[in-house]
Image (cartoon, rainbow, N blue to C red):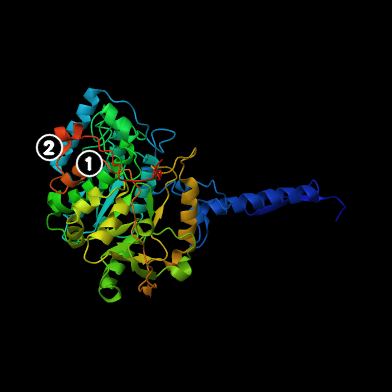
């Protein structure tokens, strides 16, 4: 053989020798190998434990990873498709009187109809059907991700999913109507700030500004009653508590198809995210109550623990007293418990705290025969992904960073999901001090409107148009000392 170099050319199964040098042959062979590997990567499905099967092939860890990109061909990806470039929160616009009237008419019409979507696919509501109540404002991006997580949950086709709105928007309504994985219903809080921009429960002409001094209020004859901290009403901070109490009354007592319902109602919010086994855990906890905690009247699927491990804590559940700041996320109770809470409506509605959860804790401490106790999961199945809301304002309200952390936690704990048994942990009881109240709820008009929901949730029945709401005398509340600002300031 001569000293000439040779290259390889692959033609089907035939290998042909051609003069041109071994270096050239190596380069050609390298290209062929790379192309072959690339073809195999595209042709073969990912292995069960391959991270690409969850993260769409993106193996780099980055806080800017968008979990929604992991669902490019999934049926649930349609819930993430936005008509606009950014819909983290729908911008409120000034409505004309005609537009407000039209929205009120739509709310009234939908309240009368009580339409249940997809009932023909999944059958009627049964007495033990799990009802999921989602309180919605205007944060559309968060809502999309919640719906995606619900769609991926096992047995989701057995529930009734109720969206309770305090903001009427066609994009939000359209998104809800695209849900096809379970029975769906929408209800609309009829006394929102959107539909009452210049009348109570919105801001009215003659209302006392927040920091008005008592003597100045008496002199100007403005309307309002100061709270514990001598601050007058701010309408934007009152709506969430009104909405929550109205929603609970509506679902438990005023929806016709739920008149015989005895099952659980799970309370979620638009910026929550659920694990795929959250319904499995809810049923498992319900079955455990008689033996694990006969005094427990609530089940809590979420918590605010910063450190938890699904491998070690995935099936652990704690028995504890219900505390609003710890157990207000993803909690559930039935109609029997609701009747006890509703009997304390005056304690809930008159308590000077604009937060519904702190008001519920006040009911637990001051009115109920036995304080509320709960079974709470050590490793949560409901997560909070909201970066912006009533209490928090940031430049970037995107949910990507938080969602990325949630997805990683669930992926790491995948084998711990759907446990067959629970490990019940009885924590030593801690003395919980009675909460004074955060203020923001001193106006007697708010007290009266809130209490009226326990009589009826109908827009027509409400006392909202009563002249009482426009003629509340100024109360100086001079017996209250101090001027500490509440947390909403």
**In terms of depth relative to the viewer, which is nearer, 110 or 47?**
110
Helix, strand or loop for disc 2: loop
Compared to residue 304, the image places residue 310 above or below, namely below
Q: Which dot, 1 or 2, sits closer to the camera? A: 1
- Residue 332 in the image: state x and y as whole percent: 28, 59
Image-quadrant location for residue 196: top left
Image-quadrant location for residue 103: top left
What is the C-alpha distance between the residues marked 1 and 2?
21 Å
What's the residue at 21%, 54% (across, down)?
A: 122
- Residue 135 in the image: state x and y as whole percent: 29, 46
Which mark sits nearer the N-terminus, 1 or 2?
Answer: 1
Compared to residue 300, the image places residue 99 above or below, namely above
Residue 444's label in the rendered image is: 1
Residue 399's label in the rendered image is: none
Residue 460's label in the rendered image is: 2
Compared to residue 31, the image places residue 205 above or below, namely above
Camera sees residue 121: no
Image-quadrant location for residue 320: bottom left
Helix, strand or loop for disc 1: helix
Look at the image and tell me in which quarter the C terminus lies: top left
Circle 1 packing at 10 Å, graded few (<14), some (14-19), many (20+), is: many
Camera sees residue 447: yes
What's the residue at 44%, 33% (across, down)?
A: 85
């Amino acid at each position: 053989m001569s000293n000439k170099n040779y290259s390889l050319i692959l033609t089907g199964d035939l290998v042909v020798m051609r003069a041109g040098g071994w270096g050239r042959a190596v380069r050609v062979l390298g290209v062929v190998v790379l192309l072959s590997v690339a073809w195999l990567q595209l042709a073969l499905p990912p292995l069960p434990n391959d991270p690409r099967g969850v993260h769409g092939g993106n193996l780099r860890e980055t806080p800017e990873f968008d979990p929604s990109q992991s669902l490019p061909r999934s049926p649930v990806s349609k819930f993430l498709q936005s008509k606009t470039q950014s819909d983290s929160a729908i911008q409120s616009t000034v409505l004309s009187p005609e537009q407000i009237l039209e929205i009120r008419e739509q709310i009234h019409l939908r309240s009368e109809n009580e339409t249940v979507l997809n009932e023909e696919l999944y059958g009627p509501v049964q007495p033990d059907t799990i009802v999921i109540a989602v309180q919605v404002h205007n944060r559309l991006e968060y809502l999309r991700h919640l719906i995606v997580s619900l769609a991926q949950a096992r047995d989701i086709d057995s529930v009734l999913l109720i969206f309770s709105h305090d903001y009427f928007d066609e994009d939000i309504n359209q998104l809800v109507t695209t849900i096809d994985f379970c029975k769906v219903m929408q209800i609309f809080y009829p006394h929102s700030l959107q539909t009452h921009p210049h009348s109570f429960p919105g801001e009215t002409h003659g209302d006392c500004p927040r920091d008005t001094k008592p003597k100045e209020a008496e002199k100007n004859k403005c309307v309002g009653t100061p709270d514990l901290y001598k601050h007058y009403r701010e309408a934007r901070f009152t709506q969430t508590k009104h909405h929550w109490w109205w929603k609970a009354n509506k679902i438990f007592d005023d929806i016709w198809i739920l008149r015989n319902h005895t099952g659980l109602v799970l309370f979620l919010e638009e910026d929550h995210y659920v694990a795929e086994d959250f319904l499995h855990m809810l049923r498992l906890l319900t079955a455990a109550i008689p033996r694990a905690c006969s005094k427990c009247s609530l089940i809590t699927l979420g918590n605010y623990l910063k450190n938890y491990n699904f491998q070690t804590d995935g099936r652990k559940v704690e028995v504890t007293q219900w505390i609003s700041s710890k157990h207000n996320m993803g909690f559930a109770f039935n109609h029997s418990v609701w009747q006890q809470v509703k009997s304390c409506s005056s304690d809930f509605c008159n308590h000077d705290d604009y937060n519904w959860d702190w008001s519920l804790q006040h009911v637990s401490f001051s009115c109920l025969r036995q304080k509320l106790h709960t079974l709470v999961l050590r490793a949560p199945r409901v997560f909070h992904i909201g970066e912006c809301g009533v209490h928090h304002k940031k430049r970037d309200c995107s949910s990507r960073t938080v969602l990325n952390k949630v997805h990683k936690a669930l992926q790491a704990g995948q084998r711990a999901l759907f446990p067959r048994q629970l490990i019940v942990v009885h924590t030593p009881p801690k003395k919980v001090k009675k909460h004074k109240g955060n203020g923001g709820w001193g106006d007697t008009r708010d007290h009266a409107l809130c209490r009226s929901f326990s009589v009826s949730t109908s827009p027509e029945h409400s006392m909202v148009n009563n002249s009482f709401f426009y003629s509340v005398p100024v109360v100086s509340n001079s017996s209250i000392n101090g001027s500490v600002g509440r947390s909403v300031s």
